Amino acid sequence: MFILLAIFLVLTLEAVNTAIECVVDLVTMEYHELAKQAKDIAAFSVLLVSILALIIGLIVFIPHIF
């Protein structure tokens, strides 16, 4: 159950990240520091959830391996 939750959490946050990037690109195609920060923060949130998914996977599967 936790594995499915982790998978869907990563996929959902990836979709939100893509939406944020599209909105930022829609507003401005020029380089702007705040646009870069918005994209970086959205990508960082995906990274954090991916690390959480890895930890959940290790907690669930390590006992079955050893």
Image (cartoon, rainbow, N blue to C red):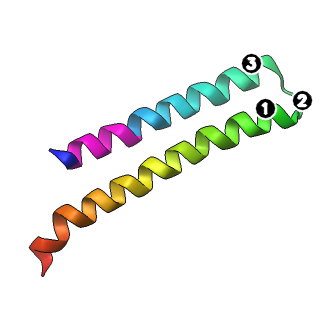
Q: Looking at the picture, tell me which residue is in the foreground, 22 or 44.
A: 44
Image quadrant in which you'd find residue 1: top left
Decide whether residue 5 is among the magenta residues.
Answer: yes
On the image, the x and y values in percent for residue 55 come to 33, 61
Which residue is painted at 22% across and 64% down in the image? 59
Instruction: Tell me if residue 26 comes above or below residue 64 in the rendering.
Output: above
- Front tag of 1 and 3: 1
Task: Sort mark 2 into few (<14), some (14-19) or many (20+) by Cα contacts within 10 Å.
Answer: few
On the image, the x and y values in percent for residue 53 come to 34, 53
Which residue is painted at 52% across and 51% down in the image? 47
Q: What's the amino acid at mark 2?
A: Glu
Instruction: Tell me if residue 66 comes above or below residue 12 in the rendering.
Output: below
Residue designated by label 2: 30
Q: Residue furthest bottom?
A: 66
Residue designated by label 1: 35
39 left or right, relative to 59: right
On the image, the x and y values in percent for residue 28 come to 83, 22
Residue designated by label 3: 26
Task: Sort mark 3 into few (<14), some (14-19) or many (20+) by Cα contacts within 10 Å.
Answer: few
Q: Looking at the picture, tell me which residue is in the foreground, 52 or 15.
A: 52
Q: Residue furthest top?
A: 27
Q: Secondary structure at mark 3?
A: helix
On the image, the x and y values in percent for residue 20 come to 62, 27
49 left or right, relative to 43: left
Q: What's the amino acid at mark 1?
A: Ala
Which residue is painted at 25% across and 41% down in the image? 5
Looking at the image, tell me whether mark 1 or mark 3 is earlier in sequence order. 3
Q: Secondary structure at mark 2?
A: loop
Q: CA distance from mark 1 to mark 3?
A: 11 Å
